[in-house]
Image (spheres, rainbow, N blue to C red):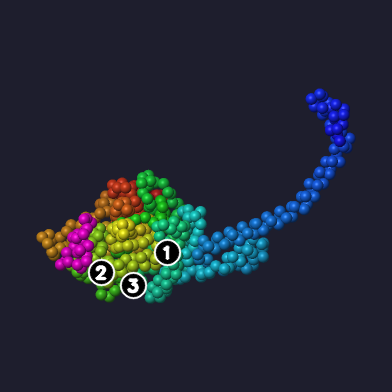
Amino acid sequence: MFFNKLRKDNYIIKKTNYLQIKKEIMKNIFSGKFLLFGLLIGAVVIGHIILVVPFILKSNAVDDDNKIEQVSANNSNTQSDVVGDLTQAKVNENKAAEVKTKVSTTEPQLSSTTSTGDLTTAPTTSRSKDLVIPGTEATPTASTSTTTKTDKKDFAKTSTNSMAESTKTAGKTDSKETKSQDRVVVRTVPLNPTYPTNKLQKRFKNTAPGMNFDYSLAVSNFAGSGAAKAGILVDLGSRKVLWAKNHNKSYGIASMSKMMTALLAMEKIANANNKTLNTVVNVSKSAAKFSAKQRGGIIWLDSRESFTVNNLLKAMMIKSANDVAYLVGEYFGGGDVNKFVEMMNKRSQELGFGHSHYVNPHGLTEYRNRKANFNKSSAEEQARLAELLLQYPEIVNITSTTSFKLPRKVGKNKYTLLANTNKLISQKKGVIGMKTGFTNAAGWCLTTVYHQGDTTLVGVVMGMPSSKGRNKFMKDLLDWGAKKVAKK
């Protein structure tokens, strides 16, 4: 061995010079003593590589296939409705595509669109969180313009059925289910086919209830928005959302709940032969009892009194009278407030409002078993609800009224002065509604409609810490929005 030669020749490190050792090593390497040993080691290494590498490659290929199957399985779980037929021509492109196709074909398939009168319903589609960024909502299909000839009765039937199918998953979400905000829904609102909306077509020609909002230009930061839990500002003419914050999250809405109460009342009137705005409603004992228990936000109903439906709607939408909202719900619920609440939730599902849930017609917090229960919705759904109410001229006339003298037949006073709780009606030109709200659970809320010329804006803010801050924020938001729309 080489090292034995080193010892024999006294080439030990401690007794020799480093340069001499290096010279001797190089001499022996080039003389071939180490060359054969190096070749032997190299051959062993190459042999191992030849034997092991195929197994590694095979193992990696299996892992990749497993990953593809896992991703496909996850996608099939997150997508509740799959639209369209799969093309079989691409099945054999590669192994990964084949695996994906096999998994995807096990999912239920739905028709791509369902015609419903003047609008088109597309199935609910589930998206990942990355796709919830503004601008991801689908655009209306071209078939919209070709379906306007459908008979009104058929439209009413098909719209209700199609919306019930497309919102089975949308209506099952609640405030704890944060994944519900990830859904992007193409909503078609089943409008009331018998109600004459032509009175407002000229004034609000740019409204299109049920059509998607476009979030591509939306900003999330606006001066003062940090104090709000959620909100939205929409230009109804272009469907563009100008500002949005937590727009698809569920929060308390307090007295903004009365917008749904008013919508159901107007739809009932439109479809009933025995109910009109001039129908006289007697104050029930249960409504009077409810009124007596409240400490504010009421007009002190008396069971000896009676009011027209029109005056009840004025007291509810102008004064935000909670006892009147109770009475309206009881009357249109056939004498049962709980039945009316069921109607509110059913209508929300029909409209595709997956973040809305109602426990009463007025918006007050109820405590059951020491647990707070209150009405909830999202900013976007409240904006859509306000747009629906714009189709009823009577409601617009009411919500744009600064004050009203309600006639009273019982008591010393001949009338009760109702002042609009929405102060922006008198503070900003162009504001024509829609509804305020406040409870400790919801904070200070406001849904506002602004209309000037050809511009119609709907603004919603929820969970503000004060009424003054809420009003100032909304006024600034509307000013900014109107200027931005005017520049286009």
Hey, what amino acid is under mark 1?
A: Lys
The front one of 455 and 313 is 313
Q: For the residue carrying disc 1, how many other residues have a C-alpha within 10 Å: few (<14), some (14-19), or many (20+)?
A: some
Gap in angstroms between the C-alphas marked 1 and 3: 29 Å
Disc 3 is placed on an element classified as loop
Residue at the (75%, 52%) spot, across then down: 52
The front one of 430 and 293 is 293
Mark 2 or 3, closer to the camera = 2
Mark 2 or 1, closer to the camera = 1
Hey, what amino acid is under mark 2?
A: Tyr
Q: Mark 3 = which residue? A: 194
Residue 242 position (above or below residue 107): above
The first of marks 1 and 3 along the sequence is: 1
Which labelled disc corresponds to residue 172? 1
Numbered disc total: 3
Tell me, yes or no, whether the two marked residues, 2 and 1, touch with CB atoms within 8 Å: no
The first of marks 2 and 3 along the sequence is: 3
- Taking the image as shown, residue 33 lies to the left or right of residue 290, namely right
| Rendered-image quadrant of the N terminus | top right
Instruction: Give the residues in magenta.
Output: 283-305
Q: For the residue carrying disc 3, how many other residues have a C-alpha within 10 Å: few (<14), some (14-19), or many (20+)?
A: few
Disc 1 is placed on an element classified as helix
Q: Mark 2 = which residue? A: 331
Magenta-span inclusion, residue 295: yes
The image shows residue 68 at horizontal and vertical percentages of: 61, 59
Gap in angstroms between the C-alphas marked 2 and 3: 21 Å
**Any part of residue 117 in sight:** no
Hey, what amino acid is under mark 3?
A: Thr
